[in-house]
Amino acid sequence: MRIGFVGNTNNYPFMLAMAVRRLGHDVTFVVDSEEKLHRPEFMYEPAAWGGIEVHFVPAIRNYRHAIASDRVVRQVARLAESCDALIVNGLWPTLAARTGKPYIVLLTGSDLELHGDPGFVIRSYWRQLSSRNMFERVVRALFAAEVARRQRAAIVKATAYNYFPRGVIPNGDRILDSLAARAGKRLSFMMTDVERCAYVPPPPDGPVLRLLLAARLNWVHPKRPGLVELDYKGTDIFLHGLKLFKEQDGRPLSVVMVKKGHDVQPTVDLVEQLGLREMVEWHDEMSQRELLEQYKVTDIVVDQFAKGVVGMAGLDAMAMGRPVLANGRPEIFEPTIGEPSPICQAANPEEVFRQLVRLFDPGVRDSVGKQSRKYVERHFSTHAAAQRCLAVFGCS
């Protein structure tokens, strides 16, 4: 069977495509972004793509591919027509819906909460428009609403769609409920490539505990236009917990923080205000491959503390055997998965402080890291996700 993939947010679909290819199916993959985060060569060496047929097309920045057809859209449509089934991301469900092929939609955030909610998208576009021409503002807002209408229709028409377990993102649940999609169409898998992210023994115990904050620096409220709840990572919660640790424990630790996200400067300012400058080591934005290299020399990986979810960065760290400090949303994932998560749970500064004290023990870090590897192997492998998608299409 030939499976076509279109759209590659965070390289998440490409991980799935690699697993589908390993199961013996032909894969055609369309990459439509110039950002490193969405380009497969910054996650996998091309020599490791395993025979995936990759096509790079120019990025479409104004969402016209959801409505209109141009040279790029026609090129993607021809590639889609050569496939037996499709797995699509971003706004490409609108194209998949026109092909007559069975397709799965991988929903990863704004493709549902922003572009699947007509009221939200109109308000968001309206606030961002700088034109004083009322006619132009109305036309652009109506265009945005039509994009949302077609995105919603494409989700309803999909053979299946994948989204977070119910309760993780209530606003996303509300939108999906409003679509009255047929029962049984919703998948809820998350994944990490456990083959690529092989277990690595923890670094030797040294005089300074080394942490790496893997989540984007998005935490300042009120929300910016175009951002959704999943984009917010609660960085301030972690930093206030770090301040408690400095004041009440004081053992040496270092935190690698990456200049990535909408709130880099507010984070720099908060680090200064809390007196944490000497504990923080700033790095420029890294590729996904570079991040994995950092994990090898890191004692603890830090993820999100807000109302989102531990994403691919945290799951990759767990696969490599690193303890992850985060709000893992145990109230949702433990009943869903059926066992407690080894994530070092913290949702407020006091819990961050207590977990840091606990994780100073190298035996605890080693034990949590090994449990984390086994946990993601059981529940979050790309192999299992690929099998579920192929079963939707009636093959294995």
Image (cartoon, helix red, strand yellow):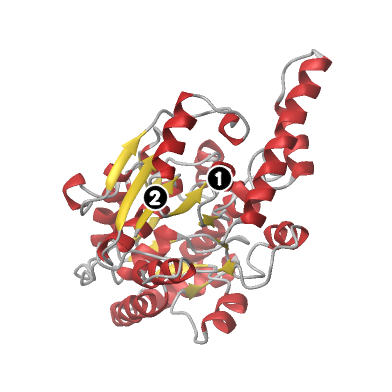
Amino acid at circle 2:
Cys
**Residue in the foreground of this view, choosing between 208 and 203:** 203
Check disc 2 and report its element: helix, strand or loop: loop
Report the front residue among 347 and 231: 231
User: Where is residue 7, by image quadrant?
Assistant: top left
Which is nearer the N-term, disc 2 or disc 1?
A: 2
Inspect the image, locate mark 1, and give the three-letter code of the amino acid beneath it. Leu
From mark 2 to mark 1, how far is it between C-alphas? 50 Å
Q: Position of residue 121 (x, y in %)?
A: 72, 39
Disc marking residue 83: 2
x and y, in percent, of residue 358 in the image: 42, 78
Write down the residue under mark 1: 270
**Is residue 254 visible to the viewer in this orientation of the structure?**
no
Relative to 370, does residue 213 appear above or below in the rendering?
A: above
**Residue 159: horizontal and vertical position, in percent?**
56, 61
Quarter of the picture containing the N terminus is bottom left
**CB contact under 8 Å: marks 2 and 1:** no
Q: Residue 149: x percent and y percent?
A: 72, 43
Position of residue 4 in the picture relative to residue 46 (left or right): right
In the drawing, does residue 345 fall left or right of residue 115? Answer: left
For image coordinates 60% across by 54% down, the residue present is: 230
* Front-most of residues 276 and 21: 21
Number of other residues with Cα within 10 Å of mark 1, as a class: few under 14, some 14 to 19, many 20 or more = some
Identify the residue at image location x=60%, y=36%: 66
* In front: label 2 or label 1: 2
Task: Assign the C terminus to one quadrant of the image.
Answer: bottom left
